[in-house]
Amino acid sequence: MIDQLSALLRLAVALDRRQIGAIQAVNCEYHPDLKQLQLNLQATSLGDNCSLELWSLNYKKESFETEFGIELVPMLEPKN
């Protein structure tokens, strides 16, 4: 259980990399046939590409993928 919670905490820290609440919402879509979890991320501010958060997430997602046996696919949705 600690390994699973640690993997989730790493993702949470990555999504708040700048500690300004750059990511407003996260919607998850699981695709069992592809063994993928798609994270649809929504930026808080219009025009923020959240590049640091996406970089950090890609850097830290390996522990999640290893622990849960699924691929994590982040997608930044445009701010409406």
Image (tube, rainbow, N blue to C red):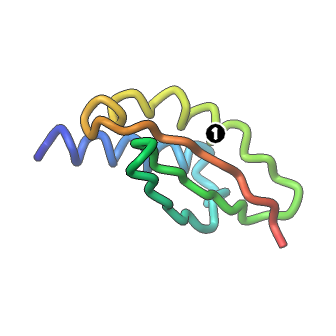
- Image quarter (top left, top right, bottom left or bottom right) of the C terminus: bottom right
Q: Is residue 4 left or right of residue 30?
A: left
* On screen, residue 19 above or below 78: above
Residue located 80% across and 47% down the image = 49
Residue 33 image offset from top left, x and y in percent = 41, 47
- Closest to the observer: 48 or 72? 72
Q: Is residue 46 left or right of residue 14?
A: right
Q: Does residue 67 appear to the left or right of 23 in the view shown?
A: left
In the image, is residue 23 above or below residue 54? Answer: below
- Pointer 1 local density, CA inside 10 Å: few below 14, some 14–19, many at least 20: some
The residue most toward the front is 33
Q: Residue furthest left?
A: 1
Label 1: which secondary element: helix
In front of the other: 19 or 76: 76
At x 44%, y 36%, the residue is: 71
Residue corresponding to mark 1: 54
- Residue 42 place in picture, x, y as percent: 68, 62
Q: What kind of residue is marked 1?
A: Leu
In the rendering, at what x and y percent does residue 72 appear?
Answer: 47, 40
Identify the residue at image location x=40%, y=42%: 35
Q: How many marks?
A: 1
Q: Name which quarter of the figure residue 46 lies in.
A: bottom right
Observer-nearest of 78 and 22 = 78
Residue name at image x 33 percent, y 47 percent: 8
Residue located farthest toward the bottom when viewing the structure as drawn = 80
